[in-house]
Image (cartoon, rainbow, N blue to C red):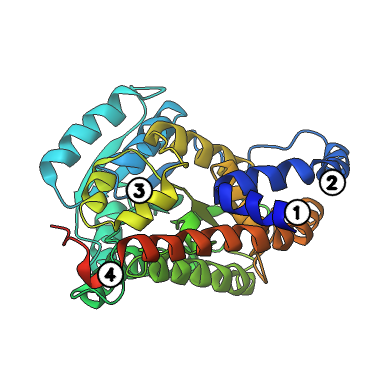
Amino acid sequence: MEYIQSALHNSSWLSLLATGTALGVAALAVAMGLLSLFGASKNHMPVNGRTVLLTGASEGMGRSAGVQLAAKGANVIIVSRNVGRLEEALAEVQAAAKSPSTQRFHYISADVAEPDYAARVIAEALAWNGGAAPDIVWCVAGMSTPMLWAEDGAVAAARRNMDVNFFGAADMSAAILREWLAPENSSSPRAEPKHLVFTASVLALFAIVGYAPYTPSKWALRGLADTLAMELHLYPDNPVRVHVVYPATIVSPGLARENRTKPDITLELEKDDPPETPDTVARRAIAGLEAGQYFVAVSLLGKLMQAGIMGGSPRNNWVFDTVLGWFMPIVYFFVLKVMNGQVLGWARKYGHPSTYPKKE
């Protein structure tokens, strides 16, 4: 028992997740063997010649996704607030085009936090696209304001995070679904489906101290997506697929902004999880969407967190996700021991949070 307690004390929660992964390989090998029986899967989200609309696409992951989708032959509409950055991003997206003579590109300036912004954006997209709605809508726009919940301003920050992260995506999803699901837009159930993509966070799978103003907005997105995934069965003649992307830390201007308010204990807990580039995250997300995944985790950490908390959400693969889901609660027992121990140790070392230096 002393050996186990010592190992827990000296381990990081990320190393325990990695150890848990190694222990689960034998069980997952069975699931993977079953997966191989189905052969190579098709591309479930082809974009060549189709129109994709992305919010939050002037920087970071959204911008990288726009570039990569253009390279696959998509017509791309990017949405963000800052016109200057939109013009720069659009030039980069256009330069990546697979077929420059036939592909088309456009930007729309809009603030996703404004109520009913999406109706105007969709109307402009329809006008630009000859009356046709985008085939794929990917809500990437987001923000994070990490703070301890008892700090002054935390609730106000949470409202702002909810406006951008949840309501920005919710408003867009309602606007595009009204268009896609209209009776006059019915088609054969075998027609190429439309795709609605939400961008959540691994923090919607596993909460960490310091993200109280941010995490609920991403959990809410997951709840909306789960509900829509069921609701859309009401429209068999208007096929739409819903997806949720779960990135971890991304190197971006947004990360620099959130680090200005991030508590030191949060930085300590995250130190073993290196940020990934927007290009890497966008590439993995697109690969997951092409594979037809509902939950698109773009890192090993995200895949493990996903397996441990899927509940009533649709599965990417029932065998794989179920086997890993049986195993992860055992791993989480030890992970939470370590993480809560780290937080308690921090409190003993640095005292009451009211004595911490204020973040600017």
Amino acid type, mark 4: Pro
Between the residue at mark 3 and the residue at mark 4, the CA separation in whole angstroms equals: 39 Å
Nearest the eye: 74 or 248: 248
Residue position marked by numbered label 2 in the rendering: 31
Nearest the eye: 265 or 185: 265
- Compare marks 3 and 2 and give the one earlier in the sequence: 2
Residue at image position (29%, 23%) is: 95
Between the residue at mark 4 and the residue at mark 2, the CA separation in whole angstroms equals: 46 Å
Within-10-Å neighbours for mark 3: few <14, some 14–19, many 20+ = many
Amino acid type, mark 2: Ala
Amino acid type, mark 1: Leu
Q: Contact (CB < 8 A) between labels 1 and 2?
A: yes
| 338 relative to 123 in the view: left or right | right
Residue position marked by numbered label 3 in the rendering: 54
Between the residue at mark 3 and the residue at mark 2, the CA separation in whole angstroms equals: 35 Å
Nearest the eye: 111 or 267: 267
- Compare marks 4 and 1 and give the one earlier in the sequence: 1
Q: Position of residue 123 (x, y in %)?
A: 27, 60
The quarter of the picture where the C terminus appears is bottom left
Residue extending farthest front = 2
Nearest the eye: 51 or 258: 258
Between the residue at mark 4 and the residue at mark 1, the CA separation in whole angstroms equals: 37 Å
Q: Position of residue 355 (x, y in %)?
A: 21, 68
Residue position marked by numbered label 4 in the rendering: 353
Q: Name the element at disc 2.
A: helix
Q: Is residue 144 visible?
A: yes
Residue at image position (42%, 36%) is: 276
